[in-house]
Amino acid sequence: MPKSSLQHQLYVIIFGTHTTAGRVFDIGLIIAILTSLLVLVLESLPNVMVEWSTQLRYGEYFFTGLFTIEYILRLYCSPKPRAYATSFYGIIDLLAILPTYIAIFFPSVAFMGVIRLLRVMRIFRVLKLVRYLQDSNILLRSLLMAKRKIFIFFNTVAILVTIFGSLIYVIEGPQNGFTSIPQSIYWAIVTITTVGYGDLVPQTALGKGLASLTMLLGYSILAVPTGIITAELNNEMKSHRTLVKCPNCSKTGHEADAMYCKHCGSDLAEPDERVVPVDK
């Protein structure tokens, strides 16, 4: 599109952050998103709605109209409107305005507007924090690498709570509140996770003994997923290190963004000259 056209100027302001106008637009957008969420939260308070219901409703309509205009402008100035509309941010932008329109016919849907909070993720782009997402990617890859172990762990826990739930149902019975096996499994889940709501409590000595064993087992189980994820995270961080050798001491194992050797303090090679291990 021609640089002098209105479409291009809007594109630079709305999609870009390298200009003052673009940064002001994005920061103003984030403030509007947070303010609209505050309005939504206040609408859920009965005592506030008694006095401010009209003002809050008009505020919701105002922000919805504002975000609708913004969405239309994004479609208008985007070089590839379809690509934007089907992208992650495009879908989130659309979902942020739909609940208010749907609420005209189904009022309970209005509170789904909290999805606007996902739009605050743009702050990573506005404040140039994308480089910090690399650390979150390491954590995500660690979770993905540990998914099979975690799946097996959860299956084991599911079997245990089923067994303990069935046992407590046989021991206590409906007369003590354990009216069914699903209800008893709920008690086992609450107990083994050390939440302990107290809405179901064993009354017999045998039932209390089983509850004690379940609680002790719960403390042991908590350490298992922590150890699995920690081990995978440690492996991922090790594989993230570069294979570049220090020109002075010839040692490897430096972080990807390291500029100096952690052993002798000498300058390392430039980042584009480093050898990074390939993920298997």
Image (spheres, rainbow, N blue to C red):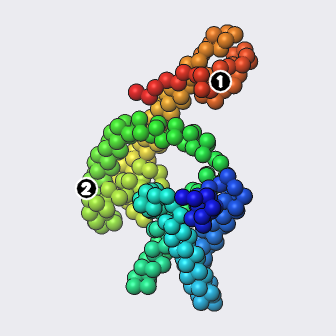
From the viewer's perspective, is the residue at label 1 or at label 2 nearer? Answer: 1
Q: Secondary structure at mark 2?
A: helix
Q: Give above or below for 89 relative to 100.
A: above
Q: Nearer the viewer, residue 256 or 49?
A: 256
The residue where tag 1 is placed is 270
Mark 1 vs 2: CB contact within 8 A: no
Can the viewer see residue 6 in this picture?
A: yes
The kind of residue on which mark 1 rests is: Glu
Position of 143 with respect to 247 (left or right) is left
Residue 183 percent location from the top left of the image: 31, 62
Q: Give above or below for 264 relative to 5.
A: above
Badge number at residue 129: none
Report, in whole angstroms, how far the alpha carbon at label 1 lies from the one at label 2: 68 Å
Could you tell me which residue is drawn at 38 percent across and 39 percent down? 147
Tell me which numbered mark, 1 or 2, is placed earlier along the sequence: 2
Could you tell me which residue is drawn at 51 percent across and 71 percent down? 72
Number of disc labels: 2
Q: Give above or below for 259 relative to 198.
A: above
Q: Quadrant of the N terminus?
A: bottom right
Residue 51 percent location from the top left of the image: 63, 90
Q: Quadrant of the C terminus?
A: top left
Q: Residue furthest top?
A: 249
The kind of residue on which mark 2 rests is: Val
The residue where tag 2 is placed is 170
Could you tell me which residue is drawn at 32 percent across and 48 percent down? 158
Quarter assignment of residue 266: top right
